[in-house]
Amino acid sequence: MVGLSMLPVKLFAALAFAFAVLAGLAHLSPIPGLDLYVRGVYWVVGPRLVLLFCVAASLNFAVLYYAGERFFQARWNRALSILHVCLFLSFAIGLSVAFAISTHFATGAGSEVEIYWSVVPLLVGLCGLVTGFVVFAINLALTVTHIVRARLGSP
């Protein structure tokens, strides 16, 4: 039972390792960044930066889930925890596909229509990230509520 309760910790740790390996591979082969122009602001987001963010965020969530389990004896909602991992993974996949499309376009092999389609996985990824943060906040609120109720002795 202990192994199953630590499933989110293990999944986020595995994601952090996978993202670290991908960040190392991205360092070896330079991939052009994604140029975004939104409401008069020009942004360039590089794949290594996104992968390093994914490493840091995955490690952060692994530590948070571990600390809740070990130090506070918290019982995280398993379904929300797994949903959080899946939403975070959709963020990483969405941004990876957006970078692949933009790289294909940057080499001159793609058409202008393809670059417009890179917005779809980008939006899916960003929505996955934001929704994942919301799901984690809900899971954290439920866990803190259970901890407080257990500490105060309320049924």
Image (cartoon, rainbow, N blue to C red):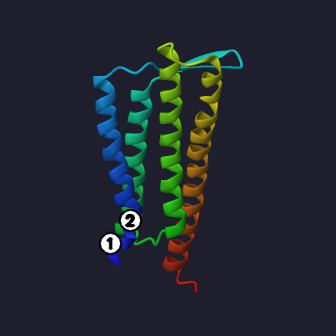
Residue 39, quarter of picture = top right
For the N terminus, the image quarter is: bottom left
Disc 1 marks a residue whose amino acid type is: Gly
What SS does tag 2 mark?
Answer: helix
Disc 2 marks a residue whose amino acid type is: Leu
Residue at x 65% of width, y 22% of height: 113
- Front in this rendered view, residue 32 or 140: 32
Q: Could you tell me residue 80's position as x and y percent?
A: 54, 64
Q: Is residue 128 above or below residue 86?
A: above
What SS does tag 1 mark?
Answer: helix
Q: CA distance from mark 2 to mark 1?
A: 7 Å
**Do labels 2 and 1 touch, CB within 8 Å?**
yes
Residue placed furthest toward the right: 39
Q: Is residue 86 above or below residue 32?
A: below
Residue at x 41% of width, y 56% of height: 64
Q: Could you tell me residue 2's position as x and y percent?
A: 33, 75
- Front in this rendered view, residue 6 or 137: 6
Q: Could you tell me residue 77's position as x and y percent?
A: 52, 69
Residue at x 64% of width, y 35% of height: 120
Q: Where residue 3 is drawn, which disc sits there?
A: 1
Q: Is residue 72 above or below residue 153?
A: above
Q: Residues within 10 Å of mark 2 (few under 14, many from 20)?
A: some
- Which residue is label 2 attached to? 7
